[in-house]
Image: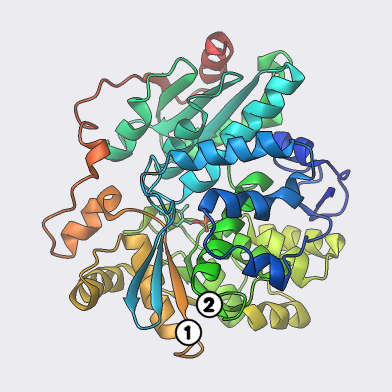
Amino acid sequence: MRYISTRGQAPALSFEEVVLTGMASDGGLYVPEEVPTLSHDDLADMAGLSYAEIAFRVMKPYVNGEIDDATFRGIVEEAYATFSHDAVVPLNQLDANHFLLELFHGPTLAFKDVALQLLGRILDHFLQKRGERAVIMGATSGDTGSAAIEGCRHCDNLDIFILHPHQRVSEVQRRQMTTVLANNVFNVAIEGNFDDAQAMVKASFADQGFLNGTRLVAVNSINWARIMAQIVYYVASAVALGAPQRQVSFCVPSANFGNVFAGYMAKRMGLPVKQFIIATNANDILHRTLADNDFSKQELVATLAPSMDIVVSSNFERLLFEAYERDGAAVKALLERFQAEPTALAEAPLARLRESFASHSVDDATILEVIREAHHRTQEVLDPHTATGYRAAERERADATTPVITLATAHPAKFADAVVKAGFPGVPLPPHMDDLLECEERYTVLPAELAEVQKFVAENRR
Ligand SMILES: *Cc1c(COP(=O)(O)O)cnc(C)c1O
């Protein structure tokens, strides 16, 4: 198994190389050259297995023997032992045929833990084998930073530097990052906004000279291993509800499209999925593209579901590559046009997308209404991201008899502001996080100046 770029011009890479590389040299994203298959029997045999065992079986072909089976199994088991629920990602029934897949039982209470707990350990394994060290740099407006830190805090061969905008992330989100006192974790509060922080990370990847040859690694959702890890819960939940004998549908609160693309991969592998429903907040580029063929950027809107506030969906490129029948030149041309001006997809690729995907956009007022309505009907308090999915699933599902699984991407305690706005007294943090607001914090405040930030990274990496 090799990995190829969606723009067709970068060299094909092995799994190890692709995990250590991030973006392809031609500006594209890596995808597997062939999609491995899960036969009817493979799926049937998964009934009743543990999450870690299903994860091992689903991911094994992508790892391609580059980590031996016993070691990989150990990595997978360790990654998912950090979750506080024995099912790792339990299904919760809402009505006769609507289910929530709770992806928020990891260390930082959001679904990004599922991929980052695994990615940190895989990176550490490959670096150890090569006798190398690497630096991770990332910018965060909240969620991704803490999940990346939790995923790397035990990794001997990695130092992680996460930049967040000073005094512009919520206290819970800041503390989830800054109370991790491991000696390979560095939190930097930038005196600027998120875009300033992100621009400095991008500039550092573009010119890595300040690290004197040490590798810089990206753990954002363009890293293939994150997609790979997320394929697993689509398979595990569908099997729990009767696959391969029974079809299911999925509804996915979406932003950068990494999560729902993983679902699409599960379908391509052979999982019987009837329909994917993409839920967006007011930042609705995915919905506009699918519903109106309006593939254009719009101003960023700050919403009650902030982890879905995006202008461009980076992983959508991976789906476009499939919709354009793996014509890298066509994808490159389309995305170059998109960067310059509003554009549209060609008819045949759009029709292919519409065979598998429906979409729905949910504004802030509706998010609050849905949190109240879902509680009234089911006693569940949804987080605002999951609320977009709940509404989209009810509105867009193709039929009432196929079970629909809405992905619950965050714990409501993590986004208590929206829950309070909806009229609830607030949501307590789970017991294992009781002391978050008292723990010691450590972070460094730096001006929004590239040279200062790079000096800090170069001096503090081990
Ligand atoms: C990151 C995130 C999303 C969006 O996921 P994508 O893979 O970017 O589409 C949705 N909800 C929450 C809570 C998130 O943290």
- Residue at coordinates 43% horizontally, 78% vertically from top-left? 393
Type of the residue with mark 1: Arg
Q: Is residue 348 visible?
A: yes
171 lies above or below 127: below
Q: Quadrant of residue 181?
A: top left
Type of the residue with mark 2: Ser
Q: Are marks 1 and 2 in contact (CB under 8 Å)?
A: yes
- Residue at coordinates 37% horizontally, 73% vertically from top-left? 390
- Residue at coordinates 79% horizontally, 41% vertically from top-left? 65
Q: Position of residue 105 (x, y in %)?
A: 37, 49
- Horizontal relation, residue 341 to residue 141: left or right: right
Numbered disc in front, either 1 or 2: 2
Q: Please name the residue that numbered disc 2 is placed on.
A: 249
Q: Is residue 117 visible?
A: no
Q: Quadrant of residue 100?
A: bottom left
* Marked residue nearer the N-terminal end (1 or 2): 2
Numbered mark located on residue 397 in the image: 1
Pick the residue in front: 289 or 280.
Answer: 280
- Horizontal relation, residue 90 to residue 238: left or right: left
| SS for callout 1 | loop
Distance CA(mark 1)–CA(mark 2): 8 Å
Q: Position of residue 158 (x, y in %)?
A: 59, 22
285 lies above or below 69: below
Pick the residue in front: 154 or 280.
Answer: 154
- Horizontal relation, residue 373 to residue 244: left or right: left
Quarter of the image for the C terminus: give it: top right
